[in-house]
Amino acid sequence: MAEISGKMYIVVGAAVIFLSYLVNTMRNTKAFSVFMVVGGLFVGVGIVKIWARLNRHTELHDEHLTKGHLHSVDKAVPPHLRPATEPKISHYCSRCGFPMRMHDIFCAHCGFRAG
Ligand SMILES: [Zn+2]
């Protein structure tokens, strides 16, 4: 059995909905509303089929991208292996403005006692 394409489902479903609507209107009845539901199901199946096919392509594409990405990832240097940075300057001498580190008590520039 050949696979029926999603487009075919949508076309058939739309035709069923249209004909049911036509008959309902002509006969002034709602007896054929059930066929409109069936037609809606056909359209739904068709959309799902098309969506599934598109999704399959997207997944393959994503997988390819992910593999390529993994090969190019650089191993991040853990923080404790990175070169030590300069001692943090926490404040400035209130007399001369010289930068002072966290635990400096006296200004290295003018000898002013901070804190
Ligand atoms: Zn100073």
Image (spheres, rainbow, N blue to C red):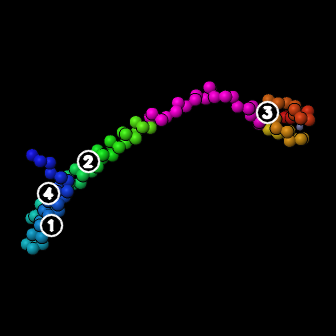
**Alpha-carbon neighbours of circle 1 within 10 Å: few (<14), some, or many (≥20)?**
some
- Mark 2 vs mark 3: give the one in front: 2
- What is the spatial separation of the Cα atoms under label 1 and label 3, in whole angstroms? 81 Å
Q: Residue 18 carries which label?
A: 1
Q: What stretch is highlighted in magenta?
A: 70-90
At label 4, which amino acid type do we have? Val
Which label's residue is closer to the chain start, 1 or 2? 1
Q: Specify the quarter for ligand 1.
A: top right
Residue annotated with mark 3: 101
- What is the spatial separation of the Cα atoms under label 4 and label 2, in whole angstroms? 21 Å
Question: In the shown orientation, is residue 105 left or right of residue 52?
Answer: right
Cβ of mark 1 under 8 A from ligand 1: no
At label 3, which amino acid type do we have? Arg
Q: Residue 52 carries which label?
A: 2
Q: What element carries label 1?
A: helix
Q: Which mark is residue 38?
A: 4
Q: Is mark 3 on a helix, strand or loop?
A: strand
Which label's residue is closer to the chain start, 4 or 1? 1
- Mark 1 vs mark 2: give the one in front: 2
Q: Name which residue lies at 29% across and 49% down.
A: 54
- What is the spatial separation of the Cα atoms under label 3 and label 4, in whole angstroms? 78 Å
At label 2, which amino acid type do we have? Ala
**Alpha-carbon neighbours of circle 2 within 10 Å: few (<14), some, or many (≥20)?**
few
